[in-house]
Amino acid sequence: MDQVPLELDNLKYTVEMKGNKSVHIKGARKSQEQKRATMQVCIRVEGEQPVPLVLVLTNKNHASNRFEMPPGLASRKVSFNGSTIKKVESDWYDKSVVTMWDPKAWFSADVAEDWYEWFLKKTSKVRKSRRKKPSISLQVDNLKQQIHPRIQHKLFDAGVFMHKLPPNCTDILALIDHNIGKFLKVKMSDYYWNEFSKSDESIEYFSTHIKEHEWRIWYTIWAGRAWRELCTQKDMIIKCAKAVGYCNCLCGCENDKIGVFWDGYEYVAPSREEKKMKPLSKDEITLHRQLHKINKINKKRRERRRKAKRKAEKRLAAQKQKESDRQS
């Protein structure tokens, strides 16, 4: 489980008509606050996805229950995408996406409490089908509001083990950060730019005429498409999970699929033979600590693999001895 912030308007790119001598790139402005959103992604490695995608949208006058529509938007009827038909805003939303509300469109403490209660309801069937407790392992990073002791005790009593990642290792050990979050963001961005560049009218619509409620509706539509496409990529999800060592074979035969180091980066510690050793920077110190922890984990895995090999060899030797005894 992890949060994926959305930024569809990448300021490195812009669209302008051919032949113009100057191109104006718009900077940050207050109206960009209405485009904020955060995807709360909770994905199951194998099987069907019991927890749908949650989209945290921005609204200052939210309800006490963050899943409910804000009071100012609950009964207001709006039109969408040039249609003359007016509906309640939530009727335009994609049904496969669940919406939550926060003033900063972030996974705040109140949003976290409501989400965890909803998460336990959605996973009740999976937990009941397994006799052993804890029956579910939930991988989380060190975001304070989602690892509060009260939440941890509630999850553990319900049969959910909270697997907390070590500090400063989220980008290399988190499952969502291994291509899953990137997949959703790239798909959302592609859907946005496809709609944006359809025609001159759509360019003008997304540049000037689009309203705040239309941004929210488009977000749910694009997020629903990306989520449905991700759910079909079962091989990719399992591959990403094995890359962080989350569902690998216990005998150690799939250890070569673990890839938690940065690609193309080689950490070289200073040698003691040098007369004057330069002091390590803060980044090098944190990197050295991370690598030291990861090396410890890999060392334990190698020891388990050796023990499994020895047991297998002993079993084979015992079987051969029995067969020779029978023949004799």
Image (cartoon, rainbow, N blue to C red):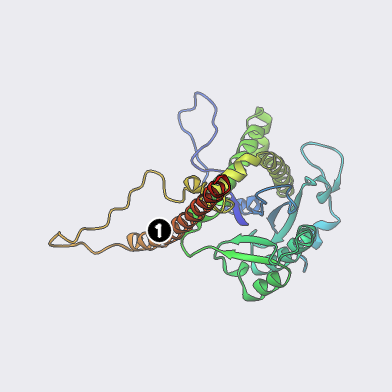
Closest to the observer, 71 or 266: 266
Would you identify the image quadrant in which residue 230 lies?
top right
Question: Is residue 118 rendered to the left or right of residue 13?
Answer: right
Q: Position of residue 103 (x, y in %)?
A: 66, 63
Name, please, the residue furthest toward the front: 328
Question: Is residue 247 rendered to the left or right of residue 255?
Answer: right
Name, please, the residue furthest toward the left: 275
Closest to the observer, 222 or 155: 155
Question: Is residue 221 rendered to the left or right of residue 247?
Answer: right
SS label for mark 1: helix
Would you identify the image quadrant in which residue 192 lies?
top right
Q: Quadrant of the N terminus?
A: bottom right
Q: Residues within 10 Å of mark 1 (few under 14, many from 20)?
A: few
Would you identify the image quadrant in which residue 161 lies?
bottom right
Q: Position of residue 275 (x, y in %)?
A: 12, 62
Task: State the residue at coordinates (69%, 39%).
Answer: 232
- Name the residue carrying label 1: 295
Q: Position of residue 62 (x, y in %)?
A: 74, 64
Residue 7 can be seen in this image: no
Closest to the observer, 28 or 160: 160
Task: State the residue at coordinates (53%, 47%).
Answer: 324
Q: Position of residue 162 (x, y in %)?
A: 62, 66
Residue 228 can be seen in this image: yes
Question: Is residue 318 rendered to the left or right of residue 262?
Answer: right
Kind of residue at disc 1: Asn
